[in-house]
Amino acid sequence: MTQKFTLYVKGMHCRACILLTESEAHELAYITRAKSNLKHHTIEVFGDFADKTPDAVATDLTALLHPHGYPTS
């Protein structure tokens, strides 16, 4: 079952940030689509999250994005 979570991404400021955050989100096997929003500093992620909570997804994304300067919550 496809679900959607919207997470805040700190530090996004340009179109390159959008491309990077979306690209990195796709590294997580359970994410099938990602859409970043520069105006609201968010990323919408879609996929089959099974029993993962939004906090667990944020933790997984932060592990990928934090080295680039983008923590999520």
Image (cartoon, grey):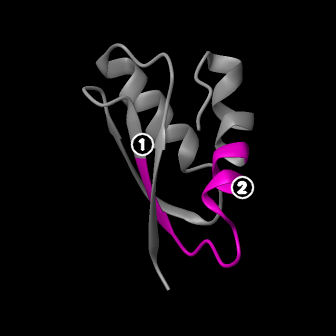
Name the mark on residue 70. Answer: none
Q: Which residue is mark 1?
A: 43
Vertical arrangement, residue 41 with respect to residue 6, above or below = above
Q: CA distance from mark 1 to mark 2?
A: 15 Å
Q: Which residues are magenta?
A: 44-59
Tell me the quarter of the picture where residue 4 sits.
bottom left
Q: In screen coordinates, is 36 left or right of 72? A: left
Q: In screen coordinates, is 57 left or right of 47? A: right
- Residue 70 placement (x, y as % from top left): 58, 23
Tell me the quarter of the picture where residue 50 sits.
bottom right
Residue drawn at x 66%, y 64% as measured from the top left = 53
Query: Is residue 52 found inside the magenta-colored segment of the image?
Result: yes
Residue drawn at x 42%, y 19% as measured from the top left = 12
- Residue 56 placement (x, y as % from top left): 72, 55
Determine whether the residue tagged by mark 1 lies in a helix, strand or loop: strand
Query: Please, what is the three-letter code of the amino acid marked with disc 1?
Result: Ile
- Residue 1 placement (x, y as % from top left): 50, 86
Query: Is residue 22 found inside the magenta-colored segment of the image?
Result: no
Q: In screen coordinates, is 27 left or right of 34? A: right
Residue drawn at x 48%, y 16% as measured from the top left = 11
Label total for image: 2
Which mark sits nearer the N-terminus, 1 or 2? 1
Furthest-bottom residue in this view: 1
Image quarter (top left, top right, bottom left or bottom right) of the C terminus: top right
Q: Which residue is mark 2?
A: 56
Using a 10 Å C-alpha cutoff, classify the residue at mark 1 as few (fewer than 14 neighbours), some (14 to 19) or many (20 or more).
Answer: many
Query: Please, what is the three-letter code of the amino acid marked with disc 2?
Result: Ala
- Residue 2 placement (x, y as % from top left): 46, 78
Looking at the image, do the residues carrying marks 1 and 2 touch, with CB atoms under 8 Å apart? no
